[in-house]
Amino acid sequence: MRLRIESIRLIGAEREFLLAPGLNIIVGSIATGKTTLLRCLRGLLGSGLENFSLETRRTISNLAGQIRIGDQEYAVLRPFVTTRTAMVDVAGEAEVARLPALQATSNYPETYGNWLLRHLGLPVLDVPSAPTQADSVPTPVTINDYLMYCTLQQGEIDNSVLGHTDFSKNIKRKYVFDILYGKYNIEIAKLREDLRRVVSELRRLQDQTKTFQEFLAGTPFENQAQIEIEARSVAKSLEEVSQEAATYAEQSLHNVGSVEQRERIRTIESEIAKLESQLKAENDACDQLGRLQVQLQSQSKRLTRSIVANEVLVDFDFVICPRCGSPLDASITTDSICYLCKQPAPDSQVSKEAMIKEQDRLERQIGETRELIEMHKKTAAKIEEVLRGKGRERVHEAEELDYQTKSYVSDEASRIAEIAKHRAELRERQRTLAEFLQLFSRFNEAQKRIANLDADRGAIQAQIDSAMSSLDNVEERIRYLEKEFREILAQFKRPEFTESGITGIDRETYLPRLDGRRFDELQSQGLKVMVNVAHVLAHQLTSLKYDLKLPNILFIDGLTGNMGYEGLDQERIESIYRYLITLNEQHADQLQIIVVDNSIPSIAKPYIKAELTEDSKLIPAEVLRQVLLHNEKDEE
């Protein structure tokens, strides 16, 4: 789990810092930029870039640096903005990536934070946002949640343990502890997600069934069996009323004599249909004979021209037969056979006398066709006259039927309305009962589903309990953590209390206890700092001992800010730094520690990697003036 920052460059401020394995100290007086530099280092590892000073934001445009994960080194370039989707560029020996900083997008589903998780081998898990509520909305464990155990911030080092006073951070703090020490793994996370889904659906169904029962309580619809009996009774009554209505309607038709009247109307309509068919046939015949007449006249004209020119008419094509008017098809014969008379086509020239004879025949046929057309027109006119009469007769009979029906309905209106009303009431009641029966059906299905979900919840909870109880080495790791915690505090020469209790880790809160006292019960801020430093160092040593999934990097801001510099307090400061130097000698290649402090003992001066002063602040005054001047020019 080696994670190390090799260097950082503040683009815009033109500052660069090189860091070494093991212990690195950043020292300087107040308001020179030490904390800002430390937060920039954390920014290289995916933390948010909010709450920086205005001067810092105006000056720094990007963070650039080299980080080492395991044995691989990567160059990182991150824009110095608060936008969660701002793109971070990462380049290694065998990998190049461009990733959104903290929030995935449709084009980039992996964030820089998740990239760090993957390369560090940290589990990607979702945990309930409220541990006591299995159906609470899941929330992811991020790289910053893991690095919470690697960071002592200036505002928290003397008043809280890894932000335990913040409700949201405290929840994540405990989850990360469970993950690190093996009490919470991917298998348990999956089971908890299954439990959350089951409990959520179970609660939803229970709320629905409860609402349904409360809604029906004290109403005529609260008894399903009673509704089923009434539904059968209503269905039977509706069938009887419908039969009565049909019988009454049939009887009423006979009573008013409308059956015979309707039969007469149907007979007239049948006769009208037959006459209309005949009329159409006569009109079609007229049209067909008219076309034949035109054809014969055209043929006669051609014969006239042929007689005058003394030539035979041999190239006339007939479309319909000049005798019967039927359509002709010239494709059924060859060129040598006439498709009209079926005789071989003559080779010799026809005489003028023969053509005159043929023309006389055509004139007679034209006259006959004209007579036929007139005959069909007269027949069509007679049919139209008969149709008009039948139409008037049809209107008269329909008016008579309408009068008889209205007279009867007027006389029997109350009875008809009573039947219709009763039938409508029965149908509405049937619909209402059917809807309630459908609700009861859904209620019964929900009850069965609730029983199944309740059984599933018990089974999943049993699996979770079994999985957690099988983690035998968790307690061993926590006991080792406690041992290291006590030994480190002893090295720090921490104060002793008259009434001594257990010094270790609370199994419920995972917070440190000192001589039986909770962290919040400690009155001395300096003592709280010592406890906090010993606590995070103990976690790192336990991680190295058991190869826990804890990144082996540690940020400590304000190590001695709340401790005195006289007498025993000075000895304790020196003992803390002496212990850090010892850790550097033993685990420099495995654990990088970055300490920010106002002043340090002389034994720690060889480990200073950056010293900031009033004359050499993180953001140089000259650089800031140039930036402000450039901005003013841009505004103009």
Image (cartoon, grey):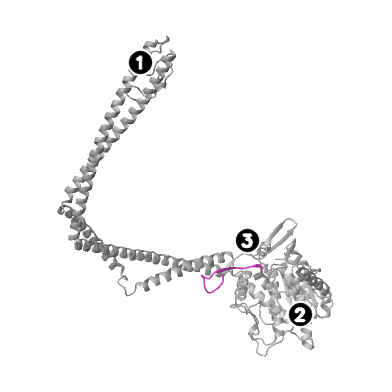
Residue 316 in view of the camera: yes
Q: Horizontal placement of 462 versus 627: left or right?
A: left
State the residue in front, 512 or 86: 86
Q: Horizontal placement of 208 versus 9: left or right?
A: left
State the residue in front, 413 or 445: 413
Q: Main secondary structure of the magenta part?
A: loop
Residue that lies at the very extreme toward the front in this rendered image:
308
Q: Is tag 1's residue or tag 3's residue first in the polypeptide sequence?
A: 3
Residue 626's label in the rendered image is none
- Residue underneath mark 1: 358
Q: Are marks 2 and 1 in contact (CB under 8 Å)?
A: no
Element marked by disc 2: helix
Separation (CA) of disc 2 from disc 1: 140 Å
Considering only vertical position in the picture, is 107 above or below 489? above
- Which contiguous range is marked in magenta? 128-143
Element marked by disc 1: helix
Percent across and percent down for residue 214 are 37, 74
Q: Is tag 2's residue or tag 3's residue first in the polypeptide sequence?
A: 3
The residue at the point 37 percent across, 23 percent down is 297
